[in-house]
Amino acid sequence: MSPGRRVLDEATIQASHTIPSEVARRLKLVVFDVDGVLTDAGVYIGATDSGESVELKRFDIQDGLGLKLLEMGGLRVVMISGRVSPATAIRGGELKLEVYQDGGAEKMRHLKGIMEEDGLDWSEIAMLADDLPDLAVLRRVGLKAAVANAVQEVLDEADWVAHARGGHGAAREFCQAILQARGQWDTLVEEYVSARELDA
């Protein structure tokens, strides 16, 4: 059992790894927290010889491909962080994803702007979360998800809980679960692979 996991009976644990197809099919937007979800929550801070600060974060490459497959499946994917970091902006840029960073952890403000822009209802949004700054949004969305090592308050809200920890495959697991529930996973995998095959 992963640290921080709820103590539940086996039937409930199995249900927490299943996304109903009707829930997955109505999704239009998937929101990912960054620190603790797309990273392992660690921050490496140092300085160059000239005294310029340097910050490094560890992102999981397989998670990144999962996010891109969600986009291929027609879903809007955004990264929303409650901490401003150049490393987050760089990773978002690599993936060509929308990134919203707010030093005050006011994620709701950014999400409401997206909802107004796309005319979205809360039931059409999913979020993968890990910590207290995520709760204001997590409590409202139609599909509430947590990484395995999320804090108890987030686990208590979650409809779906990953087997994996944040920054170690939880996001990929969530992406795959959504796309499988929508009946798109196998097709998208074949599309991705076919686009990278050399002509015979």
Image: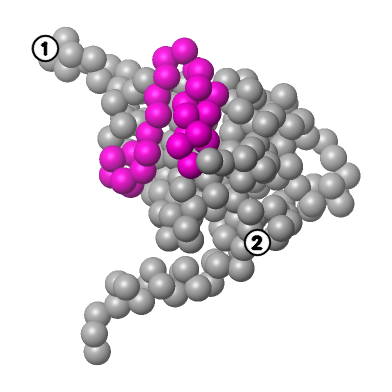
Instruction: Count the numbered circles shown.
Output: 2
The structure residue drawn at horizontal position 38% and vertical position 34%, both measured from the top left corner, is: 99
Q: Residue furthest left?
A: 50
- In the rendered view, tell whether residue 126 sits above or below residue 34: below
Residue 133: x and y, percent? 57, 20
Quadrant of the rendered image containing residue 21: bottom right
Q: Is disc 2 placed on a helix, strand or loop?
A: helix
The structure residue drawn at horizontal position 48% and vertical position 42%, both measured from the top left corner, is: 118
Closer to us: 122 or 130: 122
Q: Is disc 1 placed on a helix, strand or loop?
A: loop
Mark 1 neighbour class, 10 Å CA radius: few under 14, some 14 to 19, many 20 or more: few
Q: Which residue does the numbered mark 2 point to in the structure image?
A: 181
The structure residue drawn at horizontal position 40% and vertical position 24%, both measured from the top left corner, is: 101
Q: Which residue does the numbered mark 1 point to in the structure image?
A: 50
Q: Is residue 94 visible?
A: yes
Closer to us: 28 or 59: 28
Quadrant of the rendered image containing residue 120: top right
Q: Is residue 179 left or right of residue 48?
A: right
Mark 2 or mark 1, which has the lower sequence index? 1
Q: Quadrant of the C terminus?
A: bottom left
Residue 137: x and y, percent? 61, 28
Segment colored magenta: 92-118
- Is residue 161 one of those drawn in magenta? no
Residue 50: x and y, percent? 11, 12
Residue 190: x and y, percent? 44, 74
The amino acid type of the residue labelled 2 equals Ala
Q: Is residue 175 left or right of residue 122?
A: left
Q: Nearer the viewer, mark 2 or mark 1?
A: 2
